Image (cartoon, rainbow, N blue to C red):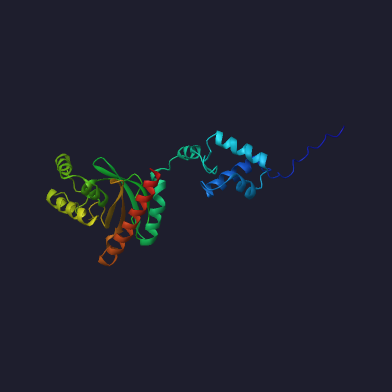
């Protein structure tokens, strides 16, 4: 029988060759971006080594498409509006992905569980958490929901409400003891709300979870409450000696998150 021809192996794949014109376009954009409004045709030609005729055509194409502009007086180049338009079309990162790096840093710095909460009507909901590294640590679940009056993040929300809004909240809320330590007396809650407004921090001690103390502060973006960052600490480890550290690290984290969220808005 005649032998069948053996199939030839395609061999190792070769790296794709770069497209010279594409490289030149990117080089031009990067050079203009690095020297916004200060780079001329001759300097581009000298720095990039692109022949005059090719550079002239590439620059004209980029200007026609809005990626570059040329100052009429100086004849120098700057980035055009199309660059900003493309940047604005980038997918907006989710809020949990935005806050998670800061929460991880907070958890490392304090070795405790950190969380980021947002208001959900008369409740707050955890949208991002990072569990502390110690053997005894509270595991905060994403999606965990709690009434405003029972957790530190919720008391931050109450502190940012007007007195009229708080009175309406008290009127419609059926206070229940989540634990034996949950505060359900409006008078005591009013006192805590006033303290929260003065200090910028809210506290709970075993009011939502037995054995756990909480401390939270606000993340404010453009004068609006954007969320709350908190720490959940076993009560056996929570005391005056580390409360100062917790407040310092929480405030620094809240400031950092406010900057991040403002930039992404």
* Vertical side of 244 occupied by 164: above or below: above
Look at 29% across and 60% down and name the residue there. Answer: 247
Image location of residue 101, percent across then percent down: 42, 52
Residue found at the far left of this picture:
187
Residue found at the far right of this picture:
1
Q: Quadrant where the N terminus lies? A: top right
Look at 31% across and 61% down and name the residue there. Answer: 248
Residue found at the far bottom of this picture:
241
Q: Is residue 3 left or right of residue 189?
A: right
As rendered, which of 99 and 257 lies closer to the eye?
257
Look at 35% across and 59% down and name the residue there. Answer: 112
Count of numbered circles in the view = 0
**Location of residue 54 by image quarter:** top right
Residue 253 visible somewhere in the drawing: yes
As rendered, which of 8 and 168 lies closer to the eye?
168
Residue found at the far front of this picture:
73
* Vertical side of 112 occupied by 174: above or below: above
Image location of residue 160, percent across then percent down: 22, 47
Residue 205 visible somewhere in the drawing: no
As rendered, which of 232 and 16 lies closer to the eye?
16
Q: Quadrant where the C terminus lies? A: top left
Image location of residue 181, percent across then percent down: 19, 54
Image location of residue 140, percent across then percent down: 34, 51
Q: Is residue 238 left or right of residue 97?
A: left
Q: Is residue 81 left or right of residue 113?
A: right
């Amino acid at each position: 029988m005649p032998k069948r021809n053996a199939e030839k192996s395609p061999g190792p794949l070769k790296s794709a060759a770069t497209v010279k014109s594409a490289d030149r376009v990117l080089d031009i954009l990067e050079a203009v971006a690095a020297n916004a409004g200060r780079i001329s045709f001759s300097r581009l030609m000298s720095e990039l080594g692109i022949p005059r005729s090719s550079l002239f055509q590439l620059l004209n194409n980029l200007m026609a498409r809005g990626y570059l502009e040329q100052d009429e007086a100086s004849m120098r180049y700057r980035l055009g509006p199309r660059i900003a338009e493309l940047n604005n079309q980038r997918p907006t990162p989710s809020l949990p992905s935005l806050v998670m790096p800061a929460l991880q840093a907070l958890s490392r710095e304090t070795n405790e569980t950190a969380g980021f909460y947002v208001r959900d009507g008369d409740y707050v909901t955890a949208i991002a958490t990072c569990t502390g590294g110690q053997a005894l640590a509270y595991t905060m679940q994403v999606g965990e929901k709690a009434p405003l009056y029972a957790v530190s993040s919720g008391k931050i929300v109450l502190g940012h409400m007007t007195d009229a809004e708080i009175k309406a909240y008290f009127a419609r809320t059926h206070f229940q003891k989540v634990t034996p330590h949950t505060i359900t007396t409006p008078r005591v809650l009013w006192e805590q709300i006033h303290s929260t407004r003065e200090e910028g921090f809210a506290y709970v001690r075993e009011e939502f979870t037995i054995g756990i103390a909480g401390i939270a502060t606000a993340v404010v973006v453009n004068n609006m409450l954007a969320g709350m960052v908190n720490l959940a600490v076993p009560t056996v480890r929570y005391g005056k000696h580390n409360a100062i550290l917790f407040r310092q690290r929480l405030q620094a984290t809240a400031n950092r998150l406010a900057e991040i969220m403002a930039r992404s808005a």
